[in-house]
Image (cartoon, rainbow, N blue to C red):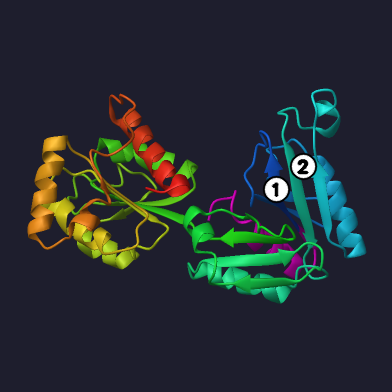
């Protein structure tokens, strides 16, 4: 799991090791705050920290508050706001304003609740963490926040006192076709927070030499997708240009909840692809889920730029919907 996203796991580990742990979560932002709502920082009792709530702007102040909160066993709701005149005094030179919820594990955030959250995350089960910042009531919810789950969007509910922290499974990317674009796309996807796989039954393409240290699946694409399990936190990208490889994978992806499906090829290639899939019984509204030609139209030239266009389109679909 990416180091930017495993604050809850680290908090539980430090708590169980007897070091003490505090979770700090961005619950609201205004202006140009550097981290989005839901971003987390975990602080141990000895001051060690992991994660980020502001990209380094106010971490020092949050650590001090967290250490005091841990000693007193109390929740704290911090707010760091800036004006042009006092930006440097509060550490937010970027000019944003953030509210941060500080929760010591055990005394405020029950370790039983945190352990249940970890089990759900490990099982790739979406879960929402509800906390009423006034009453202190806390619970885990599996249903009722469909829009928040779909958009991966934590935040306060309309009444203003209940914060909902969305804990979706980690993002995954399955790339069919171990081609040059895939070589550029794999590291970009990992930096963007994805757990990437490359699928290609052709040994000359999907080799360790071409993809050192990467997850390479040498099965046929449909078998690989079935084995991986395509869910609502999975993107599927097809890069082979070969219907024998792309089409079976598309049939699996289109029947799944994959949030993004993209296929490389010209408009003519894509039109032919849609014809074949329609003949295979795929209905028009499902065919419309395929992004083809793949990627945002940024005038990309060469594999690295095409990979950037693909990541950009995946991000747009993830954050704003298709």
Label 1 environment density (alpha carbons within 10 Å; few <14, some 14–19, many ≥20): some
Marks 2 and 1, how far apart at CA = 16 Å
- Asked whether 7 falls inside the magenta stretch, the response is yes
Report the residue that reaches farthest toward the bottom. Answer: 112
Question: In the depicted view, which residue is nearer to us: 11 or 259?
Answer: 259
Work out whether mark 2 precedes mark 1 in sequence or the reverse, and give the earlier one: 1
Q: Within the magenta stretch, is there residue 168?
A: no
Label count reads 2
Residue 58 at x, y percent in the picture: 78, 39
Label 1, secondary structure: give it.
strand
Establish if 307 lies above or below 226.
Answer: above
- Which disc, if any, is residue 28? 1
Judging by the rendered image, the residue that carries numbered circle 2 is 59
Q: Is residue 94 left or right of residue 145?
A: right
Q: Residues within 10 Å of mark 2 (few under 14, many from 20)?
A: some
- Is 164 situated above or below 62? below
* Front position among marks 2 and 1: 1
Residue at (23% x, 43% y) in the render: 239
Identify the magenta region. 1-22
Whether residue 317 is visible here, answered yes or no, is yes
Q: Position of residue 317 (x, y in %)?
A: 40, 46
């Amino acid at each position: 799991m990416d180091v930017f996203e495993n604050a809850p796991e680290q908090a539980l580990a430090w708590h169980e090791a007897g070091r003490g742990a505090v979770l700090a979560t961005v619950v609201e932002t205004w202006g140009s705050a550097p981290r989005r709502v839901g971003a987390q920082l975990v602080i141990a009792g000895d001051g060690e920290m992991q994660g980020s709530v502001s990209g380094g702007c106010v971490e020092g102040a949050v650590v001090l508050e967290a250490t005091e909160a841990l000693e007193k066993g109390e929740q704290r709701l911090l707010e760091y706001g800036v004006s042009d005149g006092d930006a440097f005094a509060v550490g937010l030179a970027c000019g944003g304003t953030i509210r941060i919820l500080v929760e010591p594990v055990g005394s405020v955030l029950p370790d039983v609740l945190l352990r249940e959250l970890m089990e759900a995350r490990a099982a790739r089960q979406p879960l929402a963490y509800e906390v009423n910042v006034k009453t202190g009531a806390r619970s885990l919810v599996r249903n009722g926040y469909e829009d928040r789950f779909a958009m991966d969007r934590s935040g306060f509910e309309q009444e203003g006192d209940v914060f909902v922290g969305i804990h979706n499974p980690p993002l995954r990317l399955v790339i069919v076709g171990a081609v040059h674009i895939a070589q550029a796309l794999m590291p970009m996807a990992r930096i963007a927070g994805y757990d990437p796989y490359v699928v290609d039954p052709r040994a000359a393409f999907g080799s360790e030499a071409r993809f050192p240290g990467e997850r390479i699946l040498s099965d046929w694409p449909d078998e690989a997708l079935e084995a991986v399990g395509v869910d609502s936190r999975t993107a599927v990208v097809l890069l082979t240009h070969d219907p024998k490889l792309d089409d079976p994978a598309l049939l699996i992806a289109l029947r799944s909840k994959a949030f993004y499906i993209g296929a490389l090829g010209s408009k003519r290639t894509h039109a032919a692809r849609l014809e074949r899939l329609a003949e295979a019984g795929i209905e028009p509204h499902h065919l419309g889920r395929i992004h083809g030609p793949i990627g945002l139209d940024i005038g990309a030239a060469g594999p690295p730029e095409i990979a950037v266009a693909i990541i950009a389109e995946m991000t747009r679909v993830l954050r704003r919907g298709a």
